[in-house]
């Protein structure tokens, strides 16, 4: 192997480590690994992710551009913290987009994708019966991910992925409330039933109801209103 081959291998390895570090930090942000408005330092992240400071700077610049973190003069890079209005806007957009994705899934899902959704839902039933909150949460995320993929609508999926709603959910979730939320499993069952029967309108309606119910369960409080209330909607 000549010198150029060695440099090429080093470059590829560095790029792979950078991509892995980006995925790891993004996953930490989405899973609640950092509290809102937490300062992220290059030194701390370099140690946590085992990559160079230059790589960390590139990753943080990308995450700033994508909206996962913010960067301000004299304040550094911090995790996002959403106002109630910003959070509600994001969650309402999610409601519209995911309803559209569910409708497309009802039209386009393959047999294999439907079988996958059934398997995930069965796992969610088992998790709820066993009071396994972590397993239920994993199943919930998998169900929505599979449904998005089953829509075969890449433009809608990209818009949906850009919403940062997991960060909003982490910030405003009522940790004292029961999990999974009462009615959550039944709502997923209703969504799957409409997708399996190839009913796009019903699938969209079932998803909108589900996402709106989840939104109302969050601690979104407006002046003069109770939690989860906006534009005349009432807490479920």
Image: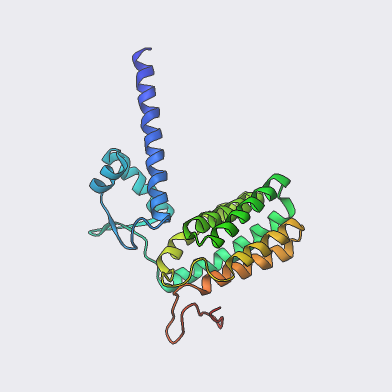
Q: Residue at x 32, y 42 (%)?
A: 49
Rendered location of residue 196, percent (x, y): 74, 56
Q: Is residue 93 left or right of residue 190?
A: left
Residue pushed farthest top?
1
Residue pushed farthest bottom?
224
In this view, the residue in front, 133 or 197, is 133
Q: Residue at x 47, y 57 (%)?
A: 134
Task: Please state, as top left, top right, bottom left or bottom right, where the N terminus lies in the image.
Answer: top left
In this view, the residue in front, 235 or 77, is 235
| Position above or below: 213 against 36 | below
**Colouring:** rainbow
Task: Please state, as top left, top right, bottom left or bottom right, where the C terminus lies in the image.
Answer: bottom right
Residue 195: quadrant of the picture: bottom right
| Position above or below: 129 against 85 | above
Q: Residue at x 46, y 85 (%)?
A: 225
In this view, the residue in front, 82 or 186, is 186
Residue 20: quadrant of the picture: top left
In this view, the residue in front, 196 or 63, is 196
Q: Total of numbered circles in the picture?
A: 0
Rendered location of residue 40, percent (x, y): 28, 53
Rendered location of residue 2, percent (x, y): 36, 12
Q: Residue at x 39, y 54 (%)?
A: 29
| Position above or below: 95 against 54 | below
Rendered location of residue 62, percent (x, y): 39, 47
């Amino acid at each position: 192997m000549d010198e150029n081959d060695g440099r090429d291998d080093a470059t590829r390895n560095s790029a792979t480590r950078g991509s892995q570090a980006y995925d790891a930090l993004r996953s930490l942000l989405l899973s609640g690994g950092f509290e809102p408005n937490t300062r992220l330092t290059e030194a701390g992240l370099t140690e946590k992710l085992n990559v160079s400071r230059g790589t960390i700077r590139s990753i943080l610049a990308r995450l700033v551009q994508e909206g996962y973190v913010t960067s301000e003069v004299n304040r550094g890079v911090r995790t996002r913290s959403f106002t109630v209005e910003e959070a509600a806007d994001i969650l309402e957009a999610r409601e519209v987009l995911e309803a559209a994705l569910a409708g497309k899934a009802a039209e386009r899902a393959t047999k294999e994708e439907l079988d996958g959704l059934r398997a995930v839902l069965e796992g969610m039933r088992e998790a709820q019966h066993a009071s396994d909150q972590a397993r239920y949460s994993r199943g919930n995320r998998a169900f929505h991910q599979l449904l998005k993929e089953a829509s075969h609508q890449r433009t809608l999926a990209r818009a949906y992925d850009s919403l940062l709603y997991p960060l909003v959910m982490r910030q405003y979730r009522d940790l004292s409330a029961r999990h999974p939320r009462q009615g959550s499993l039944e709502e997923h069952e209703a969504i799957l039933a409409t997708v399996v029967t190839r009913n796009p309108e019903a699938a969209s309606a079932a998803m909108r109801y589900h996402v709106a119910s989840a939104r109302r369960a969050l601690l979104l409080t407006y002046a003069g209103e109770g939690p989860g209330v906006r534009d005349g909607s009432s807490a479920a």
